[in-house]
Amino acid sequence: MQPHLEALQDAKACPLWHDSDEQPEQLPSLDSDKQCELLIVGGGFTGLWAALQAKERAPEADIILIEQTFVADGASGRCGGFLNTSLAHGETNSEHHFPGESEKLEELGTQNMKEFLETLERYNIDARYEHTGAMSVALDEESAGRLHEDYEKYKAAGDDVVFFDKDAVREQVNSPKIHAGVWERDGQDGVIDPARLCWGLKATILKLGVRIFEGTKLLDIQPVGKDRMKAVCEGGVIHSNKVLMGTNAFRGAIGKIRRSVIPVWDYQIATEPLNEEQAALINWPNTRHALSDYNNMFHYFRLTKDNRITWGGGGAVRYYFNNGTDRSLEQVPARFEQLSKEFFEYFPQLEGKVKFSHKWAGIIATSTRFCMVPGTAYNGRMAWSVGYTGHGVGASRFGARVGIELLGYKPTDILKMQFVKKKALPWAPEPLRWIGVKITQAELTRADKNGGKRGLWLKMLDALNLGFTC
Ligand SMILES: Cc1cc2nc3c(=O)[nH]c(=O)nc-3n(C[C@H](O)[C@H](O)[C@H](O)COP(=O)(O)OP(=O)(O)OC[C@H]3O[C@@H](n4cnc5c(N)ncnc54)[C@H](O)[C@@H]3O)c2cc1C
């Protein structure tokens, strides 16, 4: 058997983050009709942060949160845990879609991050935050050159950045694939344990009086009269004044949400904890960088507190025809095999020495603007924030803030920004959607192999403001 397949043989089909004695008990499902002021749908970061911030702004608000399976079962409990300040998937994307607002968005991102970390302190939430900064690595000489240009730009803007050339970068993380690296170490970017964050938020909002029903799916939702909403759920009906949808790319009753995002599957694997000998082979556990490569189809990889490597992204990312979200897609052997193969291309010195302990996948809500899409319906009685496109760990707290402000909880000037008001371009219908995503993915891969040079298709998307650039 090939070594990369052998390394996967005993991997457990379960998100690493869920596999813990600390996972809280699932709360009972809804079993009778209820009333509340605010109904929140979705037990991921968006829903949990929305409940917490609504309670902080209006302590008397009567809030119910429902989750169709269990808190942290969506993207939030399955993600890489990279905590990033950016709200709009980086400056290039933000300038592209919201011209003139990138400075304000940066300011809001920094404020969001500060409040995020202060909240963890305030409520004693141990999300295993590590302040690592963010390190981007180039995989060929051409990309190394472009990365160096970025470094010069960041430095000129006064950022605290370090450039590592080919020799220096291998002291930071020893991989023959890596040609250079830029480490952005100012700000608060880092890594967290995402399930622990969900669990901590869940415990906190319960203490603040939010009622949570797990195993409770929203089936249909309709307005009633001028100021009420009726949510038909498994187990009962909930009447509320307001509804916040934090449902990511799961397919639901609201057409505007369905058209704004598509479900893109992202697969991950995690190694067993590295021992000292394995760690010494790659240097990395000394520096503990949170890494991603400087590609369109990028890998992201990090260390956990117990020195496992989690590894995701690259060529294993998939959109399945007609918005496939079936749970069987969580375990597609070919995706894990590809990830494992790519892992050992990065770290050949670990081949035959390290095994994977976990394999899993989750759904990324991807929007045509590659960052969150807020919206409202039913005369402002319903709001949502979806579509963080792979950058949702930090941004979802802000998305939740936008959502509750749209519902009238102490609204601020952020609601006047294009970032909130501008409509996202809807995705094309099938089969154009699937064909478009396939071609784009193939072209992004081609550009990555070609030192980042974008072909005609990507240039056309760029011209239409639809080009994905990291
Ligand atoms: C594999 C992977 C890796 C990622 N890595 C990173 C990363 O490192 N850094 C980063 O910033 N972002 C990352 N992301 C993105 C990030 O995880 C998401 O943007 C973020 O978690 C979205 O939070 P959410 O609450 O909106 O969605 P979710 O966490 O998916 O929560 C939505 C919840 O709504 C529930 N729901 C849906 N429909 C219904 C219904 N009808 N009734 C009741 N409940 C319903 C779902 O069950 C789900 O629990 C990653 C995503 C994935 C999948």
Image (spheres, helix red, strand yellow):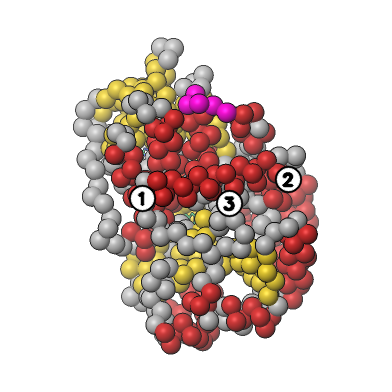
Query: In this image, 160 relative to 129: left or right?
Result: right
Residue 10 location in percent, x, y? Answer: 33, 75
* Residue 410 part of the magenta-drawn span: yes
Q: Nearer the viewer, mark 1 or mark 2?
A: 1
- Along the line of sight, which residue is nearer the eye, 77 or 397? 397
Residue at left offset 63%, top offset 67%? 183
Residue at left offset 59%, top offset 47%? 110
Residue 85 location in percent, x, y? Answer: 58, 51
Q: Name the residue under label 1.
A: 124
Q: Earlier in the sequence, mark 1 or mark 2?
A: 2
Indicate the amino acid at tag 1.
Answer: Asn
Residue at left offset 57%, top offset 62%? 133
- Along the line of sight, which residue is nearer the eye, 241 or 3? 241
Q: Are marks 3 and 1 in contact (CB under 8 Å)?
A: no
From mark 1 to mark 2, how far is it between C-alphas?
36 Å
From mark 3 to mark 1, how far is it between C-alphas?
21 Å
Q: Looking at the image, can residue 153 be seen?
A: no
Q: Which residue lies furthest to the top in this view?
A: 225
**Secondary structure of the residue carrying numbered label 2:** helix
Residue 153 location in percent, x, y? Answer: 77, 60
Residue at left offset 60%, top offset 50%? 86
Q: Which of marks 3 and 1 is nearer the N terminus?
A: 3
Mark linked to residue 85: 3
Q: Which segment did they paint magenta?
A: 407-412
Q: Is mark 3 within 8 Å of ligand 1?
A: no
Q: Mark 2 points at which residue?
A: 95
Indicate the amino acid at tag 3.
Answer: Thr
Q: Nearer the viewer, mark 2 or mark 3?
A: 3
Q: Quadrant of residue 226?
A: top left
Q: Nearer the viewer, mark 3 or mark 1?
A: 1
Q: Which of marks 2 and 3 is nearer the N terminus?
A: 3
